[in-house]
Image (tube, helix red, strand yellow):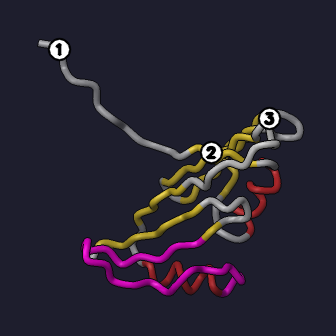
């Protein structure tokens, strides 16, 4: 009997106007490291923090607006991460709050208008 395919991991791919600038922001402000960069200057970049990866793909057609994308990131301590980001001058929509879904969450918008929502299981 054939086995069903197993999902291993997932990583969002955010469309951006400048992959190198976005990678620097995620490195310097959000604490990610650049795991891979393709092209010179880079048109596709992968950043990583712990086990979370986010990919950035430079848009070829910048004449049309792109709706913002969202990544939901599970974290161990939302309050400590919030304080880290606040100390770096990152603007967040609100402090961590307990949600009805059993998560403690906060959200921010990156320099491209994409959203990162961080959640800790209560």
**Magenta segment boundaries in residue numbering:** 87-108
Residue linked to disc 1: 2
Disc 3 is placed on an element classified as loop
Residue 33 in picture, x, y percent from top left: 67, 56
Mark 2 to mark 3 CA distance (whole Å): 16 Å
Which callout, 1 or 3, points at the residue further toward the start of the chain? 1
Q: Please check the rendered image and state whether residue 104 is part of the magenta-colored stretch, yes or no.
A: yes
Q: How many marks?
A: 3
Residue 23 in picture, x, y percent from top left: 74, 55
Quarter the N terminus occupies = top left
Disc 2 is placed on an element classified as strand
Location of residue 8 (image quadrant): top left
Location of residue 42 (image quadrant): top right
Which callout, 2 or 1, points at the residue further toward the start of the chain? 1
Q: From the viewer's perspective, is 27 left or right of 100?
A: right
Disc 1 is placed on an element classified as loop
Residue linked to disc 3: 60
Q: Are marks 2 and 3 in contact (CB under 8 Å)?
A: no
Furthest residue to the front? 64
**Front-most of 68 and 5?**
68
Identify the residue at horizontal 49%, vertical 83% (top origin): 80
For mark 2, does the 10 Å Cα neighbourhood hold few (<14), some (14 to 19), or many (20 or more) residues? many
For mark 1, does the 10 Å Cα neighbourhood hold few (<14), some (14 to 19), or many (20 or more) residues? few
The circle on residue 55 is 2
Residue 84 in picture, x, y percent from top left: 60, 82
Furthest residue to the left? 1
């Amino acid at each position: 009997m054939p086995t069903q395919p197993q999902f291993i991991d997932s990583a969002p791919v955010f469309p951006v106007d400048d992959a190198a600038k976005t990678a620097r922001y995620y490195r310097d402000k959000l604490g990610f490291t650049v795991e891979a960069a393709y092209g010179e200057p880079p048109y596709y970049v992968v950043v990583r923090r712990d086990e979370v990866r986010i990919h950035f793909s430079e848009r070829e057609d910048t004449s049309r607006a792109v709706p913002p994308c969202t990544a939901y990131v599970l974290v161990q301590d939302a309050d400590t991460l919030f304080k880290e980001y606040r100390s770096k001058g990152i603007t967040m929509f609100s402090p961590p709050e307990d949600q009805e879904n059993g998560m403690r969450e906060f959200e921010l918008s990156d320099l491209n208008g994409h959203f990162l929502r961080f959640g800790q299981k209560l």
